[in-house]
Amino acid sequence: MNTTPNTSSGLLDGKVALITGAGRGIGAAAARLFAREGARVLLASRTESQLKAVTEEIRAAGGTADFIRCDLADPDSVRAAVDRAVRLHGRLDVAFNNGATGQEPGPLDTLPEADFDRVMAVNLKGPWLAMSAEIAAIRATAGRGAIVNTSSVGSLMGNPWLPAYGAAKRAVNSLTESAAVTYGPENIRVNAIAPGTTLTEMIDEWEAKSPGIIDQLNARTPLGRAASPEEIAESAAWLLSDRASYVTGVVLRVDGGARA
């Protein structure tokens, strides 16, 4: 893992970035990458020990990072995270709404209602709350900016394994597109990424409950393997950067060709 600070002008040079779900997996990889690319990053998630470890790693490599505990299902917690970024740095330029929760694999009729509600609260209401607060902060400070939401390739098809998760992520695609149309005139771009099989703790948990699922998914992927979290983070960094200045309303598949 490369934690060497980037001394040249990076993709996100000078930008203030908020990253949810930043304690592990794709979010932690994004925090490291964004800092190497010149951003001042605020990491947010529920687990303070994970946040602290990643933040200290970034600082040790010469980056600028802080963290705040955040529960995406709690509106006050989400708004507090956005407000913290503005208090720390006087502005918010970009946000990566990556936090999520999984579900027990299985048919939709076997999922308890309480679990369905939790999946929707974190994976759908959470991004809606975050975008609402982030757009207000970008508008009031930087005046223009970009947001990327993490969806899933599982939102682009029927998802018998994870039906509630897939439904929530498909709704995130719609929210992303609606926000892109609404806020494009204010120079606020909104996109989503749809990762395929990615080697994170979430898929490790799925593998433990459904042995062989990673091999099954890889067999359906033209590149024949799962992605690293760093590979997914690269796509988010580009979409948040000024190099993607004419890209908005996109749900970008980062799936090794699985939906080609």
Image: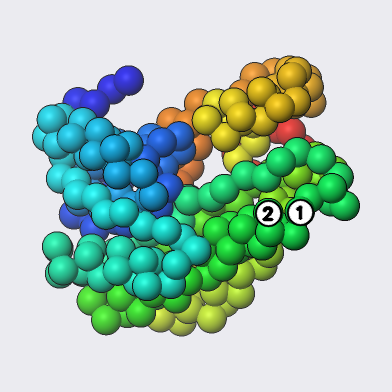
Task: State the separation of the CA atoms marked 1 and 2.
Answer: 5 Å
Q: Tell me which residue sits at (30%, 44%) in the image.
A: 48
Q: Nearer the viewer, residue 157 or 187?
A: 157
245 left or right of 215? Answer: left
Q: Position of residue 114 (x, y in %)?
A: 68, 59
Residue 115: image tag: 2
Q: Quadrant of the N terminus?
A: top left
Query: Residue 226 falls in which quadrant of the image?
Result: top right
Q: Which residue is mark 1?
A: 112
Colouring of the image = rainbow
Crowdedness near tag 1: few (<14), some (14–19) or many (≥20) residues, C-alpha within 10 Å: few
Q: Tell me which residue sits at (21%, 31%) in the image.
A: 57
Q: Nearer the viewer, residue 255 or 25?
A: 25
Instruction: Please determine whether, in this image, residue 62 is positioned above or below residue 103.
Output: above
The answer to whether mark 1 and mark 2 are in CB contact below 8 A is: yes
Secondary element type, mark 2: helix
Secondary element type, mark 1: loop
Task: Look at the image and tell me whether residue 157 can be seen.
Answer: no
Q: Position of residue 69 (x, y in %)?
A: 31, 54
Crowdedness near tag 2: few (<14), some (14–19) or many (≥20) residues, C-alpha within 10 Å: some
54 left or right of 164? Answer: left
Q: Callout 1, which amino acid?
A: Pro
161 left or right of 153? Answer: right
Q: Callout 2, which amino acid?
A: Asp
Q: Position of residue 73 (x, y in %)?
A: 50, 63
Query: Residue 53 falls in which quadrant of the image?
Result: top left
Q: Nearer the viewer, residue 138 or 119?
A: 119
